[in-house]
Amino acid sequence: MSGIAAPRWHIEPCDARSEDAAALMDELNALLAALSGDSGAARFDPSQMQSTGCAFLLARDGQGQAQGCGALRPLPEGPPGTAELKRMYARARSQGLGAALLAALLDEARRLGYRRVWLETRRVNARALAFYQQQGFTEIPGYGHYAGRTDAACLALPL
């Protein structure tokens, strides 16, 4: 009997204030704080995701368990049509989820009319930096809060 395999991940918009979203972001905050001394939580307000031009996506596995998330918001510090990627996180052992989640976020950015996506990650987060570079992001000068900070790696991807 032949068939088509079910998708491994179900990725859809979600309220960033939901219990599942909060649990994932708490995990991300703890990992980032341990890695760099700063969780990054102060620069993200989940209630902002209800605003025009914002999106928060949640990824679930085949059993319906939340496994990853990511957000987009307008970036006033960038050229017109720039979205900022925030709170991108995929749980450990979720092989392939990061790429699937990023692809869904980029599709959402296009749907919202953005022409580019910018993000910041810490240089010490070598795994994230390598991931984004493998996905086609290139380094740009620091923007906004990250301008002049040598610990911050700012990246961009045209859509």
Image (spheres, helix red, strand yellow):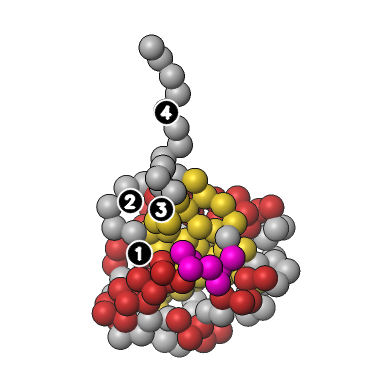
Tag 1 near tag 3, CB within 8 Å: no
Q: Earlier in the sequence, mark 3 or mark 2?
A: 3
Q: Which mark is residue 94?
A: 2
Q: Earlier in the sequence, mark 1 or mark 4?
A: 4
Let me know if residue 136 appears in the view: no
Please tell me whether mark 1 or mark 3 is closer to you in this view: 3
Please tell me whether mark 1 or mark 4 is closer to you in this view: 4
Q: Position of residue 86 (x, y in %)?
A: 50, 70
Q: Quadrant of the C terminus?
A: bottom right
Q: Is residue 99 magenta?
A: no
Let me know if residue 20 appears in the view: yes
The residue positioned 58% from the left and 60% from the top of the image is 14
Say which amino acid is labelled 2.
Ser
Tag 1 near tag 4, CB within 8 Å: no
Q: Which mark is residue 5?
A: 4
The residue positioned 53% from the left and 79% from the top of the image is 44
Tell me which corner region of the image, top left, top right, bottom left or bottom right, holds residue 38.
bottom left
Label 4 sits on a secondary structure element that is loop
Say which amino acid is labelled 1.
Ala
Packing grade of label 1 (10 A; few <14, some 14-19, many >=20) is some
Please tell me whether mark 3 or mark 4 is closer to you in this view: 3
* Residue range corresponding to the magenta coloring: 15-21
Q: Which mark is residue 65?
A: 3
